[in-house]
Image: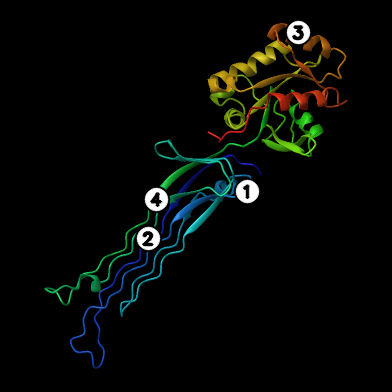
């Protein structure tokens, strides 16, 4: 099951207590303080693991804690440190402070990590407080609690090309045709239930990652419908394919359908409008689709690619256009 958002509480382990003891050994006159220090509490760290693709584990379990340090022992024995906790997250996870909302780290690359909760310091045993003026200290320290933090985890899929459009614009069908991905679909109005990545061979020896992202409706930037579940993932793509249903069965005229999606992109982030885009008229196997594609070209005053995922029409031209329009790869932001 795909999950792209989770709220969790993480806690570093508590430090172990120091103790106050005195040596009581035969042939050791006067003895002395021998209380050992407590062990340090374990840390909690997030680590990007490319084999992890969802935040589902953090939806099922909301609290995570590292191990606590052990109590110090006599004869200057140091308590063992608590076990640290390594939480594996998908590539593209944005970590936010749950209280203030600011971004702590964007874990965009494989192997990147973030220490989110430090373990508490272990307490000192009484041997630490021995001095020339105090040869038998009875003072010792309790271990310190570990850090506790509320986090919001957001997953933004990382892909080269994002498929955008209204529900039933043909995104899932297109991805099925050009890749091995099999998007899960449901009844109208929402086809794709969750973002799906597909590997597409655009030319011999070169493949790109295409993302079929849930269709949006008007008001998605305010959370209506699937809302941010669509728009959050668009931010990671280098190129957008704006798919518009040109068939006679389309719920909106092609120019109006294009305007709705453009409006939502602008409302969510004006930077998305600067992203390279290719407008694609879909379902060209429909007899009336040519009229719809032509009306879209007239409204936009630009060339619109025509494709049919059913017959395969225009797919080679589409992949060629993707290669020409795709900007160089940069670090995700």
Spatial CA distance of label 2 from label 4 is: 10 Å
Spatial CA distance of label 2 from label 3 is: 67 Å
- Residue at numbered disc 1: 52
Cβ atoms at labels 1 and 3 below 8 Å apart: no
Query: Left of 79 or right of it: where is 4?
Result: right
The percent position of residue 90, horizontal first and vertical second, equals 59, 45
Judging from the image, what secondary structure is the residue with disc 1 in?
loop
Spatial CA distance of label 3 from label 4 is: 58 Å
Of badges 2 and 1, nearer the viewer stands 1
Pick whichever of labels 3 and 4 is earlier in the sequence.
Answer: 4
Q: Residues within 10 Å of mark 2 (few under 14, many from 20)?
A: many
Q: Looking at the rendering, which quadrant does residue 196 occupy?
A: top right
The disc placed on residue 196 is none
Of badges 4 and 1, nearer the viewer stands 1
Spatial CA distance of label 1 from label 3 is: 44 Å
- Residue at numbered disc 3: 295
Q: Looking at the rendering, which quadrant does residue 121 occupy?
A: bottom left
- Residue at numbered disc 4: 148
Query: Left of 196 or right of it: where is 309?
Result: right
């Amino acid at each position: 099951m795909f999950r792209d958002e989770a709220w969790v509480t993480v806690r570093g382990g508590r430090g172990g207590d120091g103790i106050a003891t005195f040596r009581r050994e035969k042939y050791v006159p006067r003895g002395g303080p021998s209380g050992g220090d407590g062990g340090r509490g374990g840390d909690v760290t997030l680590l990007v693991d490319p084999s992890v693709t969802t935040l589902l584990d953090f939806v099922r379990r909301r609290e995570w804690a590292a191990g606590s340090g052990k109590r110090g022992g006599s004869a200057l024995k140091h308590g063992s440190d608590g076990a640290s906790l390594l939480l594996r997250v998908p590539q593209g996870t944005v970590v936010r402070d749950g209280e203030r909302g600011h971004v702590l780290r964007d874990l965009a690359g494989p192997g990147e990590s973030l220490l989110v909760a430090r373990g508490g310091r272990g307490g000192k045993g009484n041997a630490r407080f021995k001095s020339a003026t105090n040869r038998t200290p009875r003072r010792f320290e309790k271990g310190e609690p570990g850090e506790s933090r509320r986090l919001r985890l957001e997953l933004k899929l990382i892909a080269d090309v994002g498929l955008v459009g209204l529900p039933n614009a043909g995104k899932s069908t297109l991805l099925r045709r050009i890749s091995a991905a099999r998007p899960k679909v449901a009844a109208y109005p929402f086809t794709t239930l969750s973002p799906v990545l597909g590997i597409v061979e655009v030319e011999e020896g070169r493949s790109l990652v295409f993302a079929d992202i849930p269709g949006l409706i008007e008001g998605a930037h305010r959370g209506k419908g699937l809302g941010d579940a669509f728009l959050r993932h668009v931010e990671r793509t280098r190129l957008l394919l704006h798919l518009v249903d040109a068939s006679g069965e389309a719920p909106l005229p092609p120019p109006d359908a294009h305007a709705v999606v453009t409006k939502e992109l602008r409302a969510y982030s004006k930077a998305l409008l600067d992203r390279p885009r290719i407008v694609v008229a879909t379902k060209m196997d429909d007899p009336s689709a040519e009229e719809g594609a032509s009306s879209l070209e007239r409204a936009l005053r630009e060339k619109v690619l025509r494709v049919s995922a059913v017959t395969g029409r225009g797919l080679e031209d589409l992949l060629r256009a993707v290669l020409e329009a795709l900007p160089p790869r940069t670090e995700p932001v």
